[in-house]
């Protein structure tokens, strides 16, 4: 049985930052404006998601560097950086640089695995080493070691007028404690726990079987069977129960146990102050995406969470009944794709002024004390 939901302690939001190919600056400025609005509304964090070779933010670290100069309090994260596209040493340098610029507010989230459509981008991304690149967790372990300050070189000291360091520079001592792993399976959740990372869990999980007939409930004391509660369809999977099982498996392997940090990232759209036209559009958006929530998708058997649309009163009831939400006290609700800037302003405002407080959250003071 999942525990009773705790008061929401941290409220964040996630965006992919879409833009028009003929006017990319406008879309990026819109994203920066939303981050600034989030700070004014008291959000604890703002997160950007990578979109390589698409019309979304391809370089969140660069955009967050700009955001550090427009904000002073809100935490800034990536959810997530796919390490298959990155050199761990260079990424460690970039992350530390932005963390220093932010005053220690960066929360880098990452995941492992081959780049999407790897067979089509390999020659551009790794023309000489494509067949030898390691996309396993070892790539993440390299990043962890470098961020934590382990040696990247055996050269140090002064050569002529040049001074060299063994470790990545700049070194930001608190950054390692703010690293997050985006996990969607029991295996990756357990690995993240063993590494002492924080856990990002989103609106996508792997519908898997652990061999014991529990379709993802797993071992490690995870417990609940994530199949449909009514038992009417042996092929039906319960997203919330799978997510809850993964969170418990993560904490079972983490040095901090039940105190290990987990942030949930469902698509949640409050409609309290929305216009009738906006409400209709939001509901149509969720309805169009609903079929993918009914059964596992593709060879990886990915299961998607339903988008939650409604008044704050309705959303509180649905979240409190969600087994995954009941395991967390931090969220980074995802903004829907393809909406307009004014829609995001309305959604963020309702999240901060209506839904968040109804879930027990208290906004942080605005930077000017307002």
Image: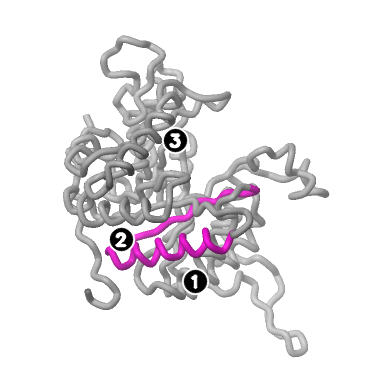
**Residue situated in front as seen by the camera: 365 or 207:** 365
| Dot placed on the residue nearer the N-terminal end, 1 or 3 | 1
Kindly report which numbered mark, 1 or 3, lies closer to the viewer in this rendering: 3
Secondary element type, mark 1 = loop
Residue labelled with disc 2: 43
Q: Residue at label 3?
A: 204
Q: Quadrant of residue 159?
A: bottom right
Is 32 included in the stretch rendered in magenta? yes
Q: 305 or 89, which lies in front? A: 305
- Residue 206 in percent (x, y) is at 47, 30
Q: Position of residue 24 (x, y in %)?
A: 59, 59
Queried whether the magenta region covers residue 181, the answer comes back as: no
Residue at 17% of width from left, 38% of height from top? 4
Q: Measure the C-alpha gap from mark 1 to mark 3.
A: 32 Å
Residue at the outermost bottom position: 161
Q: Which residue is mark 1?
A: 172
CA neighbours of label 1 inside 10 A, class few (<14), some (14 to 19), many (20+)? many
Q: Which residues are magenta?
A: 24-53
Q: Residues within 10 Å of mark 3 (few under 14, many from 20)?
A: some
Question: Is disc 2 in contact with disc 1, using a CB cutoff of under 8 Å?
Answer: no
Give the colouring mode of the picture. one colour
Q: Earlier in the sequence, mark 3 or mark 2?
A: 2
């Amino acid at each position: 049985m999942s525990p009773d939901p705790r008061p929401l302690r941290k409220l964040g939001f996630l965006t992919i930052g879409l833009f028009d190919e003929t006017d990319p600056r406008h879309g990026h400025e819109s994203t920066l404006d939303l981050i600034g609005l989030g700070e004014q509304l008291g959000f604890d964090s703002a997160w950007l998601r990578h979109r390589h070779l698409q019309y979304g933010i391809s370089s969140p670290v660069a955009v967050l560097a700009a955001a550090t100069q427009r904000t002073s309090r809100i935490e800034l994260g990536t959810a997530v950086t796919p390490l298959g596209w990155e050199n761990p040493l260079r990424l460690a340098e970039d992350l530390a640089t932005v963390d220093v610029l932010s005053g220690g507010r960066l929360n880098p989230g990452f995941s492992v695995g081959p780049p999407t459509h790897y067979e089509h981008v390999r020659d551009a991304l790794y023309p000489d080493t494509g067949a030898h690149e390691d996309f396993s967790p070892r790539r993440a372990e390299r990043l962890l070691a470098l961020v934590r300050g382990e040696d990247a070189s055996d050269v140090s000291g002064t050569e002529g007028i040049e001074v060299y360091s063994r470790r990545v520079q700049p070194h930001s001592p608190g950054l390692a404690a703010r690293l997050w792993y985006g996990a969607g399976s029991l295996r990756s959740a357990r690995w993240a726990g063993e590494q002492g990372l924080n856990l990002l869990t989103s609106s996508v999980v792997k519908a898997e079987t652990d061999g014991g007939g529990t379709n993802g409930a797993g071992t490690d004391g995870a417990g609940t069977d994530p199949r449909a509660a009514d038992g009417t369809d042996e092929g039906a999977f319960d997203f919330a129960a799978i997510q809850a099982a993964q969170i418990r498996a993560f904490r079972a392997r983490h040095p901090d146990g039940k105190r290990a940090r987990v942030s949930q990232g469902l698509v949640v759209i409050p409609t309290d102050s929305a216009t009738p036209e906006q409400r209709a559009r939001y509901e149509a958006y969720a309805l169009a995406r609903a079929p993918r929530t009914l059964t596992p998708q593709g060879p990886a058997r990915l299961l998607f969470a339903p988008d939650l649309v409604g008044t704050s009163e309705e959303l509180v009831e649905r979240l409190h009944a969600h087994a995954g939400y009941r395991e967390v006290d931090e969220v980074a609700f995802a903004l829907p794709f393809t909406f307009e800037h004014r829609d995001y302003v309305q959604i963020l405002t309702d999240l901060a002024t209506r839904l968040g407080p109804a879930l027990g959250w208290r906004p942080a003071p605005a930077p000017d004390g307002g």
